[in-house]
Amino acid sequence: MNIAIFGMGYVGAVSAACLARDGHHVIGVDVDPGKLDLLRKGHSPIVEEGIQELTADVVTKGRLQVTDDVGEAIRQTALSFVCVGTPSQPNGSQDLGAIEHVASQIGEALAGMDSYHVVVIRSTVRPGTVIDRVLPLLEQHSGKTLGEGFGLAFQPEFLREGTSIRDYDNPPFTVVGGDSQRTLDCVKPVFEHLPCEFVGTDIGTAEMLKYACNAFHAVKIVFANEIGRLSQSMGVDSLEVMRLVTQDKQLNISPAYLRPGFAFGGSCLPKDLRALLYMAKEQDADLPMLGGVIPSNQQQVQHALDYILASGKRRVGMVGLSFKSGTDDLRESPLVTLAEQLIGKGIDLQIHDPNVQLSRLIGANRRYIEEKLPHIGRLLVDDCSTLIQDAELVVLGLSDAHLVEQVVTHAGEDQTVLDLVGIPGRDRLRCGYRGVCW
Ligand SMILES: NC(=O)c1ccc[n+]([C@@H]2O[C@H](COP(=O)([O-])OP(=O)(O)OC[C@H]3O[C@@H](n4cnc5c(N)ncnc54)[C@H](O)[C@@H]3O)[C@@H](O)[C@H]2O)c1
């Protein structure tokens, strides 16, 4: 394939050399004449293991050429990857100047072309940039509309400096957010040979994915270091602790606990986190990230509460009260906190939880409700369907299939469900829908 690459920095130079090695004909474009000169002579402008040899090889074979002429690069190719820088501005926002400049230039070049061209943004950009900033410039300067003269995609780049050629050849996955299937079909063959899954998605998801991945990496590093500082202060070997933490592939290094939903609660996580933070205080170990976990968890409850209050709906039916499905344990349940806040705001609340029915509760849990939560106990109802039918707003706090079915069956068009659990098959709902954070 004939491919143009805009920006011959770390991402662009590695992509260009690897694509040329894989048999494509690549034209690299940059505004820096020094980089173009180096590349013309077969030298890579970046330092990376193996990149000098690879660049020399593909330049000698004529498979990688460079130019500062955007029109020439676009006219000779069917696919462009935009890898220009998106540096931080002093206030932390992104400088999109280079992206916008390139988008305008590509648009101008597309104006004179009959063939279809796909533009893939690979620079890291905030969600919305490709559709709200890049697309208007492409359309305005080309006089064409998306899907007719050109396609548009965003493909996050996962390579790491220092191991970039190896990372290029072994990515965790290839994710492309495209405007259409036609665009995805055009990009797919370029990456199909890689030993990973090719995932086609929408552009906004692909844009956010890059930030989510980098934030996750940063959080993991800080987590390990905070556990490290606390362990060190207590004479514990943090390297061994974290080695064992990562051995658990069921709950720790796994998709567990990584699905957006409602706040955590129950008898263990809040209690043990508080104890860990108290230990840190005793040891004079400052752990700002772990210290921020409980406030962030409370914010998730507040977020749901804010939505309910702003909705103006006064008759609320809450499905679920315990801290998770399959238990009657109410200790530190965030649904109890939410219920208490709603009562405090004068909301007309009813609650149904199949595991928390006073008629069925026994022993400690019954005593707990009667002594600690009598105000909640009074609102419990046994009949879920009536609760749903009576409510203007249904808060779904448990994901049990039979409870979801009750909402699907009984919530009508003039009602809304606030989904705290991410129910599947939302298209079956007749009522209005709001996800707690999606
Ligand atoms: N470096 C990484 O490891 C890495 C990894 C993943 C994603 N990213 C993202 O990829 C993007 C590029 O990163 P990088 O490290 O390669 O940046 P870089 O600064 O090394 O390279 C950017 C290149 O773009 C060129 N450029 C600027 N304006 C241009 C224009 N109008 N036309 C053509 N070229 C132009 C610059 O001269 C420079 O050579 C950034 O958004 C970055 O966040 C980087």
Image: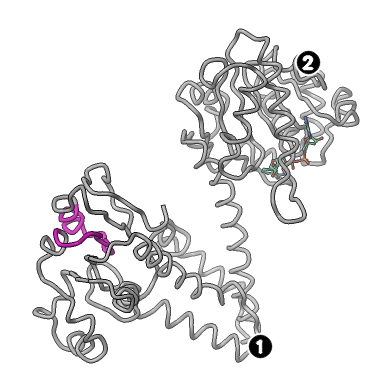
Q: Say which element carries label 2.
A: loop
Coloring basis for residues: one colour
Q: Does the magenta stretch include residue 395?
A: yes
User: Is 119 positioned to the left or the right of 26 in the image?
Assistant: left
Residue 62 image label: 2
Count of picture labels: 2
Instruction: Say above or below: 357 vs 205.
Output: below
Give the residues in magenta. 389-407
Question: What amino acid is found at the position of numbered circle 1 in the picture?
Answer: Asp
Q: Say which element carries label 1.
A: loop
Q: Is residue 14 magenta?
A: no
Residue at image location 54% in from the left, 83% down from the top: 277
Question: What amino acid is found at the position of numbered circle 2 in the picture?
Answer: Gly
Q: Given the current orientation, which residue lies at the most extreme front position?
A: 312
Residue at image location 13% in from the left, 72% down from the top: 381
Q: Residue 312 at what x, y percent from top left?
A: 32, 62
Report which residue position mark 1 lands on.
Answer: 284
Q: In which quarter of the image is ligand 1?
A: top right
Using the rendered view, name the quadrant where residue 124 is placed: top right
**Label 1 neighbour load within 10 Å: few <14, some 14-19, many 20+:** few
Residue at image location 39% in from the left, 70% down from the top: 264
Instruction: Say above or below: 367 vs 147.
Output: below
